[in-house]
Amino acid sequence: MSTQKGATVIVVGGGVSGLSAAWWLARSGVDVLVLDKGIVGWEASGRNGGGASHFQSPLFAEEQRLWPMMDEMLGYSTEYQRGKLVLATTEGQLKHYRYMAETFCENGSPAHEIDLQEIRERVPMSGDNILGGVHLTIAGQANPQRTVQAYAWALQDLGGRIQQHTPVLRLVHEGGKVTGVETKDGILGCDSVVVAAGPQSAILLAGVGIDLPIASARAEMIVTEPAPMMAIGAVDGNGLYGRQTKRGNLAYGGGPHEWLDVGPMGPSVRPGSPLVRNLTKRLLGLFSKAGNLRVIRSWAGVIENTPDGRPVIDRIDNVTMITMSSVGFGLSPASGHAVRDLVMDGKCSFADLELLKLSRFDGLSPNWRAEKGWLSHAEPV
Amino acid sequence: MTDAKLVDRYSITNRFPSASQKADVVVIGAGPSGVAAAIAAAKGGASVLLVDENPVSASLMGLDTPLYFGGRMTRAVDNKARMIEQVFASDPLLEAAFEAGVEVALGVYAWGAFQNGPGIAAMPEAAVGLADEERSWMVAYKQLILATGSRDLSLSFQGWDQPGVMGANGLHALIKRYDAFAGNQVLILGSGDLALNTALMVVAAGLKVAALIEVRNQVQGDAALADKVRDHGIEILTGHVIVSASGGADGVERATVVPVAGGDSRTFTCDTICQAIGLVPAIELFNVLGGKLSVRTDLGGHVPQRTGLVSTGLANVLVAGDCAGLSTVDAAAHGEAAAALALAALAGQPLADEAPAAATSLDAHAYHADWMTALMAVGDDSIVVCQCEEVTRGDLTAVRQPRYLGPPSEVAAKRDIKSLAGDGPLNQDQFKRLTRACMGQCQARRCREQVALILAQSSNVPVAKVPLAGYRAPVRPLPMSVLAAHDEPYDMTSNWDVWFGIASQWVPYNDIGTEREAMHLEMLTDSQHI
């Protein structure tokens, strides 16, 4: 098989993490090529809640620094909006959300409890069942679908290339390093590779002797017709995550997931389930005055998790890998920056990522999925 | 060894309750094939639930759901009790079904259908999701017969987004099923059998047909049928296309048409413009079930891939009538064939299904495309395609961001359908995401097909190559108060976590490995399922 000219860096996977990494690399003048099995952002990167509030992450500060500038840096709208309210309908929830706000503050981000009067004013659709809530002032939300396309277009504007409908069949490993990737059209050469292929990352990395422990699952969301606009659209709680979009629709998810086995070409189907009824019940709990608002759609996305639910962002020789363990969208401005740093400098310039190394799973039981009850009961997709 | 008992308690496994209602055979749609299927299945000894959404609520009719009603309903549709009587009276076969022992549920929406298969093992049994105006519930089936019929094809022209522009199925329902049509004088687009039969129905109802407008140079339907139409003094104007509809607060008052080849326009007085250009098989539930589809332009477009006359690749799911593909096949015979297969399967002695009918000579896509081409030639880019989201033809081809985001940046303004097409075959879902076309509360009933046609024409690919913009539950827009699971069982409520229930995921990075980690894990464990 002939080796064709590839790129200095090939990014496998045009999801939000891979696209952001490629964009950051292109900003540094690197010749970069993104390969995707289908269309950019087609999997979980374009099918998620759009939240940008994972304050527990070492990437959060950089994420929050970048988000307000992203539209300008990319040249395209991401619909980013700052601020998030979390409302409780039970004492248990309220206790948990207070803890969340405290932890938020301890990590350097302002958050405070809000009273019922303020909740009524800020969230007119909420009812008397709301017991209280918290305001996270610097968390936020953006439109996942618009954002992934923004990364892709911005990358192209910088001279980076994207080849869609080109699944990577394997990483080509020669002389102790990866020298290229094999596609249906032949081998594309590269000096280094970034593996950001979501559930398929484990399959690709296994081919070069790297064991990335991840398990995939399907999660579901619902969306309503447009509702009257709230000043802060990211209002969630009551067991849900989600947001009001800039158009006014309420898009929310939460609740049980279904573990799946995903083949090398990625999920072929993303079935829904009657869970839409349970999601709707909780959304109605959050906005109990909006009972007449219609649910018009639902969707499902397939995402991967590591055993501890934390990302793996690591570089081994010339292979840089990133899985955000089901919380990747909001952190993407920063995660791409981190990957760029790893590829170019071998070390993240703005955060300590020591605890996100793959080596923390050395000695993991080969049966870890079964031991956690994370095995699939469904036919593979 | 895998411990089979070890199940992630935050996962969906074992969480759904058994359905609150059960039937051997559930039939969705009480048209000719659905009723025939239900009666035959009941006579064969099966317990049968026949579900039909008619009469649909006035508010859904206002959203052109499920048919393209065009706002031409009388106030009669506000009275649901009267409408149920009317629907029952309009079809004597419903009485026959009732007498055969079929449980008939009118005014009930089928908004979803779910069974285990690739990617889902969570269903305790195969079930359809139903709803009336008050609540939603699940009904378990052993055999499901989809007889969901067809939807209206709608295309855009200047002024189409006002009351009085409607579809042939919508008009048929208002006149024949509801006796609630508010129009008097109908201009009909199309000249196929659908359009010709529509004209005769309008005349039989004592109303006027202004004319039939046909974009091609020949009448498309049966010649004898066309003669019958002309016998009523109705003009069939071939080689013409509608340019605009205009009117006042109550909608359409007149329409202007021009020759496709150019020439003088003509204006017709009319209060209704009925688009009888084509119908679209109603495949929403089949698509939600994960059934395989194929594009058959001779059967109306995207249709279930059949392995027999009414069998599909989906276990225990049969399709009958127009939803299986538009054809001249006897709808009742289709329904009876489905019932026979369902009964045999119930008895544990599956029957072989005969081969599906051979291809017809029709090419629906080519006909729809001829209309769209002519409509685009006489109308400009400012014409709205997606009424809910106010997306114009020009917005689509420019892949323009929605207006609520303000004007696009300089680089964004340079992006258009060609930049997307340069990156690979176009997918309608990309346009949904970027322009919001097809994202509105009518669930893309009014624009799904024409967006595909416009994308195909603007990028020079056959419309059959544009992937279907998929359907998802709920396939009817349902109020939250109706869809909500007010009957949620404890197994679902307990261990409800906002995300995966992985406590270590949410420990602040700086506290990992410190003495504070245990405090976080205690707070995070068992406290997010709230």
Image: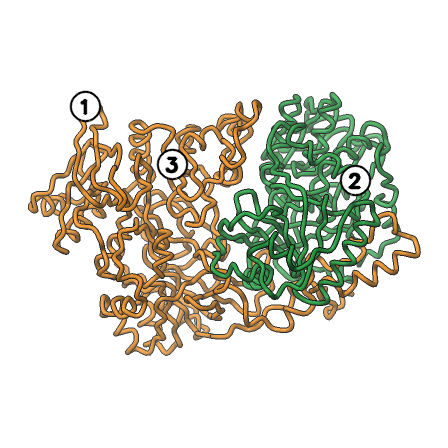
- Amino acid under label 1? Gly
* Left/right of residue A239 with respect to residue B293 in the rendered view: right
- Asked whether disc 1 touches disc 3, contact meaning CB atoms under 8 Å apart, the reply is no
**Dot label at residue B263:** 1
Q: How many angstroms separate mark 3 from mark 2 (CA)?
A: 43 Å
Confirm whether residue A362 shows in the render.
yes
**Dot label at residue B466:** none
Q: Colour of chain B?
A: orange
Is the C terminus of chain B in the top left, top right, bottom left or bottom right quadrant? bottom right
Q: How many angstroms separate mark 1 from mark 2 (CA)?
A: 66 Å
- Name above or below for residue A236 compared with residue B255: below
Q: Position of residue B323 (x, y in %)?
A: 36, 55
Looking at the image, which residue is at 52% across and 72% down? B19
Q: Which residue is mark 3?
A: B384
The quadrant holding residue A241 is bottom right
Q: Position of residue B312 (x, y in %)?
A: 43, 57
Q: Position of residue B307 (x, y in %)?
A: 42, 55
- Amino acid under label 2? Ala
Residue at mark 1: chain = B
Q: Colour of chain A?
A: green
**10 Å crowding of disc 1: few (<14), some (14-19), many (20+):** few
Q: Which residue is mark 2?
A: A61
Looking at the image, which residue is at 72% across and 36% down? A333
